Image (spheres, helix red, strand yellow):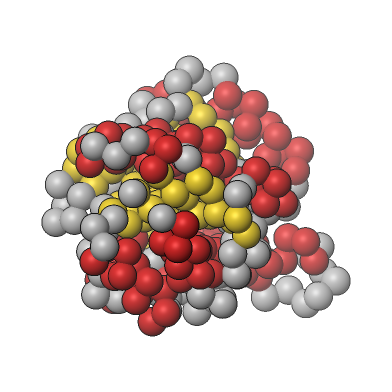
């Protein structure tokens, strides 16, 4: 059996860590011969760092499926973006203060310094100044950056895409202005070969059209010779839907988006209540 776990909002608790209970459940599944993998929007380095802090070794589907990496760092699949196609849209976003965005390479996350400062100001606003339904995701974006080891702040994003050896695997955009996000989505959708997903109505995640968690988990299952009906996935956000569509058994977190709960076979505890451990116990008891 392959058990694929989302990271933020699923495996990681509110402190951004893998709890002892979740760690022990993963080790128990591995001792029984099952493959436990991470399927995350994070870069491989950041996902692997979290595993290393918990003394765990797992394959990683990173950057929403743009790369599939085995323990030890061997890449078995890679789906980067065509950088030259992206540059006109990235330049457009650069000129709009209300659009915050990040660029992900294989081992780094790049953020323009002035956009980071603006995001921090939004996160520090009092209740009532920012709509309550988006305040949490602003704080989450800021907290996630502090948790990510491989964030590099640059004066100008052009420094990133102008370097020939920088391969872009993913872009993330965020704004409180939904019309601006819609315009960004329209511009990205005009580029062939992309897929646009979201983990919230106020953000966009841009990947190669074959770079989804569904593709990544399918490739990983094939690598280990595991049938898709023997694949279990656990997640909480919209970008987990592609792997929910291909898996044989789907588990949603108690804190998951409603659409995941509507399409799953089992709802486990929240990410702050060792929901992964409970989900793993549930599937092991089903055998």
Number of callouts: 0
Residue 274 position, x and y percent, is 51, 75
Residue 24 image-quadrant placement: bottom left
Outermost residue toward the bottom in this view: 20
Residue 51 position, x and y percent, is 30, 68
Residue at left 60%, top 55%?
266
Residue at left 76%, top 38%?
179
The answer to whether one can see residue 24 in this image is: yes
Q: Is residue 262 positioned above or below 55 on the image?
A: above
Residue at left 75%, top 43%?
178
Please state which of residues 211 and 27 is positioned toward the viewer in this rendering: 27
Residue 184 image-quadrant placement: top right
Please state which of residues 190 and 164 is positioned toward the viewer in this rendering: 190
Left or right of 268: which side holds 64?
A: left
Q: Is residue 194 positioned above or below 53 on the image?
A: above
Quadrant location, the C terminus: bottom left
Residue at left 30%, top 76%?
54
Please state which of residues 96 and 272 is positioned toward the viewer in this rendering: 272
Left or right of 26: which side holds 69?
A: left
Left or right of 249: which side holds 72?
A: left
Residue 87 position, x and y percent, is 44, 30
């Amino acid at each position: 059996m392959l058990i694929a776990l989302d990271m933020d909002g699923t495996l990681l608790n509110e402190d951004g860590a893998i709890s002892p209970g979740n760690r022990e459940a993963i080790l128990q599944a591995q001792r029984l011969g099952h493959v436990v993998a991470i399927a995350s929007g994070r870069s491989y380095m950041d996902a692997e760092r979290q595993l290393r802090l918990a003394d765990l070794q797992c394959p990683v589907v990173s950057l929403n499926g743009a790369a599939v990496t085995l323990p030890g760092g061997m890449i078995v699949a890679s789906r980067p973006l065509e950088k030259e196609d992206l540059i006109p849209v990235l330049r457009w976003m650069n000129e709009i203060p209300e659009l915050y965005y990040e660029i992900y390479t294989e081992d780094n996350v790049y953020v323009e310094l002035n956009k980071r400062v603006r995001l921090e100001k939004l996160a520090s606003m009092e209740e009532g100044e920012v709509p309550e339904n988006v305040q949490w995701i602003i704080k989450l974006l800021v907290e996630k950056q502090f948790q990510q080891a491989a964030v590099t702040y640059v004066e100008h994003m052009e420094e990133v895409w102008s370097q020939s050896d920088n391969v872009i695997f993913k872009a993330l955009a965020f704004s409180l202005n939904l019309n601006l996000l819609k315009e960004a989505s329209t511009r990205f959708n005009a580029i062939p070969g992309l897929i646009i997903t979201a983990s919230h109505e106020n953000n966009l995640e841009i990947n190669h059209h074959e770079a989804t968690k569904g593709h990544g988990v399918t490739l990983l299952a094939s690598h280990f010779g595991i049938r898709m009906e023997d694949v279990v996935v656990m997640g909480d956000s919209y970008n987990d839907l592609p792997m929910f569509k291909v898996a044989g058994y789907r588990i949603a977190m108690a804190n998951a988006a409603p659409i995941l709960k509507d399409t799953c076979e089992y709802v486990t505890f929240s990410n702050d209540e060792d929901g992964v451990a409970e989900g793993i116990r549930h599937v092991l008891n089903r055998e």
